[in-house]
Amino acid sequence: MEKAQQLTPIIFGASGLLGGHLYQHFYAQNPNTVGTYGKHPAAGLQHFDLESSSIDDLQLDDSQNYTAIICASLTNIAQINAEPEQTAGVNVHATGRLMTSLHRRQIPILFISTDNVFPGIHGNYYDDNNEAAVSEYGIQKRRTESQLMSITDGAACVLRLAKIIGNSPDDGTLLNDIAKQLHSGEAVRAASDLIFNPTAIEDIINAIDYLIQHRTHGIYNFCNPNSYSRLELTRLMAKALNKGASKIEPILFSELDPSGKRPLNTSMVNSELFTDFSFKSIHTCIEEQVVWQS
């Protein structure tokens, strides 16, 4: 792509896990990349509060062709289920205002969504599945997806992600969490009915880069094609770390959260766009985790 055609990302939520990795990735390619933070300042990032800030508050360069990646949102499912109206003020209404402002400036938008938009009853959801979400978080994300497509007349991109596997030993992602529990020596309760597609963060970064560079429009599922239960992952990690399986206690997720407001089997089928994508295997991710833990 010629320099004049290069798109410069504005990454909303660049102080978070995914946003931080995206900022590092795109900044290495283009030092004009803009990253924002809400409550957690970080070097090089500009402050932007979804509820109170305006695009006019950002220091943007009129010579750049910007594209927006929206990672910023409230993600604590327990909080969102407990405070649906308050959290929707951020995740739906404030995000919708941002999308409208970006569209008026003719800035293309890529919105990061979630496998929680599906009800989680039978799994293997395709990107055109319209069954209603059961978690308030999923409901809010689905509403925001619809808002974006309405605001832009379909000229935007939504990427639905599953559980993220990080690439450092202390980022608090899925495998780190399981390893920490196993090292504690205490009983590890792991749900056999909580099923998803754990996906390496490097793969997600590459997919987003592809979508940005190709200026792709539409709603897409993106995940490692292999799904696992929390229990299966815990057993795989225990074996790799040489931790006895006797400490692992299989449970149903309802024993942890009886509310019924959490989708169980959110396994997705990748969009056809990613048919030839080369994914990092869960076994490689686990092997890396073992090296970090040693």
Image (cartoon, grey):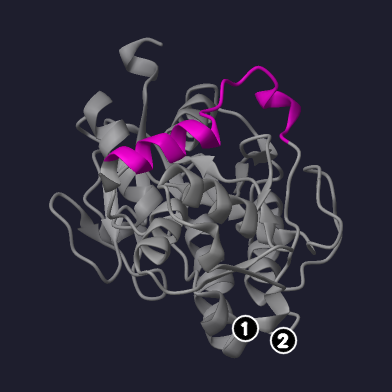
Q: Quadrant of the C terminus?
A: top left
Residue 259 disc label: 2
For this view, does 95 lie left or right of residue 41? right
**Mark whose residue sits in front, 2 or 1:** 2
Q: Residue furthest left?
A: 43
What kind of residue is marked 2?
A: Ser
Residue 105 disc label: none
Q: Is residue 22 visible?
A: no
Q: Position of residue 242 (x, y in %)?
A: 42, 48
Please tell me in which quadrant of the rendered image residue 122 appears.
bottom right
Q: Which residues are magenta?
A: 270-291
Please tell me in which quadrant of the rendered image residue 58 appears.
bottom left
Of the numbered discs 2 and 1, the one sitting upstream in the chain is 1
Q: Position of residue 78 (x, y in %)?
A: 55, 81
Considering depth in this image, is 113 or 151 the residue closer to the camera? Answer: 113
Q: Is residue 66 above or below residue 163?
A: above
Contact, CB < 8 Å: mark 2 with mark 1?
Answer: yes
Q: Is residue 284 magenta?
A: yes
For this view, does 61 lie left or right of residue 216? left
Q: Is residue 113 magenta?
A: no
Residue 81 disc label: 1
Q: Is residue 124 above or below residue 122?
A: above
Residue at (50% x, 46% y) in the render: 239
Q: Is residue 6 above or below residue 87?
A: above
